[in-house]
Image (cartoon, rainbow, N blue to C red):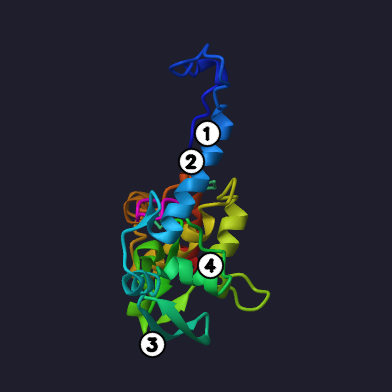
Amino acid sequence: MSTEVPESAVPPPAGAGDSSPAPSRRTFIATTTAVGGAVVAGGVIGGTSLLGPDEAAAANTAPSSHLSLMVNGTRRTVLVDNRTSLLDLLREHFELTGSKKGCNAGACGACTVLVDGQRVNSCLTLAVRLEGAEVTTIEGLADGDELHPLQQAFVEQDAFQCGYCTPGQIMSGVGCIKEGHTGSPEEIREWMSGNICRCGCYVKIVRALEQTADRK
Ligand code: FES
Ligand code: FES
């Protein structure tokens, strides 16, 4: 999140009052962004390349790997940059945008999916490590038009507001129920504590898990 600083709160630059027009903040940002982009793109600072042609070419050719895995019951085979997270693979390559990018650092659980039946933070999982794995995302949970029981329980319990955390909550909840950590509301809270809801729907989320676990 960023905080906008009003123009009036920005102190005048040194030399303000000179006859030469000072660049506006917008002009300054636009100029530095453009210059910064050129530097990064070309590996060049002040017109001098820091890399030889071969080094520059090597730097622009990131190691990549062929990867074959099952996603929601469908085999997917891709050539992927070795640095790609499972979350980016799902969202950017497979256009499965149900898994959300909240913190991209393992702290919020919005990106939770199942890998071989285990819940994981997909933002912290390197895609290249998943050769042969079975991945289930929120898009693969329903059976045709029939919602998964936990999806249905979220609807019945009204366990969301903005919904941003909900795919991760549901995928984590599926794992939590499968693991058997639903003996009490306190146990559910403990084992769902990696999933943050900024809207504060925790009471209803716990109820949805209880309802689903009771009906198993
Ligand atoms: Fe993965 Fe927050 S986006 S834990
Ligand atoms: Fe809004 Fe959870 S429903 S963050």
- At label 4, counting other C-alpha atoms closer than 10 Å, the crowd grade (few under 14, some 14-19, many 20 or more) is some
Contact between labelled residues 1 and 4, with CB atoms less than 8 Å apart? no
Q: Is residue 144 above or below residue 186?
A: below
Mark linked to residue 28: 1
Q: Residue at x 48, y 84 (%)?
A: 78
Contact between labelled residues 2 and 1, with CB atoms less than 8 Å apart? yes
Q: How many marks?
A: 4
For numbered disc 2, what is the local secondary structure? helix
Contact between labelled residues 3 and 2, with CB atoms less than 8 Å apart? no
Q: Residue at x 48, y 41 (%)?
A: 32
The secondary structure making up most of the magenta span is: loop
Q: Is residue 197 magenta?
A: no
**First in residue order: circle 2 vs circle 3:** 2
Mark 2, mark 3: which one is toward the viewer? 2
Q: Dot 4 corresponds to which residue?
A: 91
> Can residue 199 be seen from the camera position used here?
no
Amino acid marked by disc 2: Thr
Q: Dot 3 corresponds to which residue?
A: 132
Mark linked to residue 32: 2
Q: Tell whether circle 1 marks a residue whose Cβ is less than 8 angstroms from ligand 1.
A: no
Q: Give the x, y percent position of residue 167.
A: 52, 60
For numbered disc 3, what is the local secondary structure? loop
**First in residue order: circle 1 vs circle 3:** 1
For numbered disc 1, what is the local secondary structure? helix
- At label 1, counting other C-alpha atoms closer than 10 Å, the crowd grade (few under 14, some 14-19, many 20 or more) is few
Q: What span is colored magenta in the figure?
A: 102-108
Q: Residue at x 50, y 67 (%)?
A: 215
**First in residue order: circle 4 vs circle 3:** 4
